[in-house]
């Protein structure tokens, strides 16, 4: 498949100056499918001197790709560990598309060095000056409505989350990823790039951190999670108590997904999760 087959009918809405020359060399490119997620089809675009990723949101999900493009543009410009955005537009079916740099393969191995690096990358995102986003309408959602929506029909979880969020003093003054985990991190030559900005918003960085710690704890194990958690404590001003409180909120979010839209569950996942719930002093018994 050539690039022309895929891109010839795209109506580009915004593109970088560099993108014009890239599209001019479309005839030399080859496209191969990559493993996509639940939301989109993903392709690798290979040019003689450059590799790109072309993503088409042609399924049920309809995130704001214009927003993603603009936020990526600002983050990349300020040296954050994100893909370089080249263009976004619409295909003939009005599906949104995004063209970015190719930044390697999903993260599969971890050690202290890797875990520290990806923790630092997330902290760097949170430190992005929000005045640099003033021309972009980055949403700031109500925390409970976004992560514990009433349509989820889990009133017990929502009530617990509302109480903990009130205790935590949830803020919405920093850019957050919203779903930071190994599946949204690419690795190439020792560099780690954060992808999939569907949930980007102004929110509380402590929740962003806690969710990522929980996912490592549940799916990679206690040892990795403690190394990763320690990196955040060492490189930020957050306290153990703060993280435990936000980890309780992350646990409730995991349970919300488990009971509703679904989340990966393997042979020992539920027993691991049960242990995590029991150890958190902010959570009552009997949630799982």
Image (cartoon, rainbow, N blue to C red):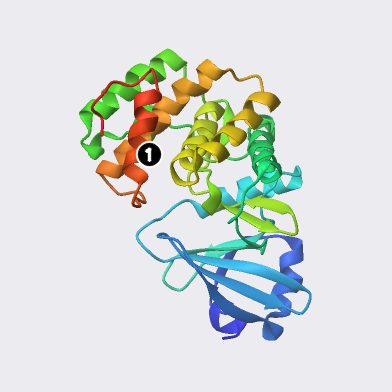
- Residue 256 in picture, x, y percent from top left: 30, 38
Q: Is residue 128 left or right of residue 202?
A: right
Q: Residue furthest right?
A: 49
Nearest the viewer among 156 and 49 is 156
Coordinates of residue 136 in the picture (x, y in percent): 60, 40
SS label for mark 1:
helix
Q: Residue at x 35, y 29 (%)?
A: 277
**Residue marked by disc 1:** 272
User: Where on the picture, by quarter, is residue 19?
Assistant: bottom right
Q: Compared with residue 210, is residue 79 higher up or lower down, i.e. above or below?
A: below
Q: Tell me which corner region of the image, top left, top right, bottom left or bottom right, holds residue 248.
A: top left
| Residue at left offset 45%, top offset 20% | 245
Q: Can see residue 109?
A: yes
User: In which quadrant of the rendered image does the C terminus lie?
Assistant: top left
Number of marks in the image? 1
The relative height of residue 247 versus residue 256 in the rendered view (above or below) is above
Residue 138, image x, y percentages: 54, 38
Q: Is residue 21 left or right of residue 241?
A: right
Query: To which quarter of the image does residue 154 belong?
Result: top left
- Residue 132 vertical position relative to residue 269 in the rendered view, above or below: above
* Vertical comparison of 140 with 52: above or below: above
Is residue 252 visible in the rendered image? The answer is: no
Nearest to the observer: residue 219 or residue 24? 219
Relative horizontal placement of residue 199, taking residue 32 as reference (left or right): left
Check the picture and name the quadrant holding the N terminus: bottom right
Q: Seen from this angle, which residue lies furthest top?
A: 167
Query: For the point 73% across and 53% down, which residue is it?
Result: 191
């Amino acid at each position: 498949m050539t690039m022309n087959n895929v891109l010839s009918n795209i109506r580009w809405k915004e593109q970088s100056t560099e993108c014009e020359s890239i599209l001019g060399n479309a005839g030399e490119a080859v496209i191969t499918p990559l493993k996509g997620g639940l939301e989109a089809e993903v392709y690798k675009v290979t040019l003689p001197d450059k590799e790109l990723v072309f993503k088409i949101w042609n399924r049920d999900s309809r995130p704001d790709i214009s927003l993603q493009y603009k936020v990526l543009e600002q983050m990349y410009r300020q040296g954050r560990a994100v893909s370089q955005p080249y263009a976004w537009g619409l295909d003939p079916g009005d599906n949104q598309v995004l063209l970015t740099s190719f930044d390697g393969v999903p993260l599969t191995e971890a050690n202290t060095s890797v875990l520290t690096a990806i923790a630092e990358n997330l902290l760097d995102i949170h430190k992005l000056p929000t005045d640099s986003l003033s021309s972009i309408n980055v949403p700031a959602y109500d925390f409970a409505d976004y992560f514990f929506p009433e349509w989820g029909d889990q009133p017990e979880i929502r009530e617990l989350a509302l109480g903990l969020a009130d205790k935590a003093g949830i803020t919405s003054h920093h850019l957050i990823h919203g779903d930071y985990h190994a599946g949204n991190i690419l690795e190439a030559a020792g560099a780690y790039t954060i992808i999939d900005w569907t949930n980007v918003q102004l929110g509380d960085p402590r929740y962003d951190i806690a969710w990522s710690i929980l996912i490592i704890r549940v799916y990679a194990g206690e040892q990795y999670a403690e190394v990763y958690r320690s990196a955040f404590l060492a490189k930020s001003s957050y306290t153990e108590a703060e993280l435990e409180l936000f980890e309780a909120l992350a646990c409730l979010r995991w349970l919300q997904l488990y009971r509703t839209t679904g989340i990966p569950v393997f042979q020992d996942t539920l027993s691991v999760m049960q242990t995590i719930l029991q150890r958190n002093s902010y959570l009552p018994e009997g949630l799982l």
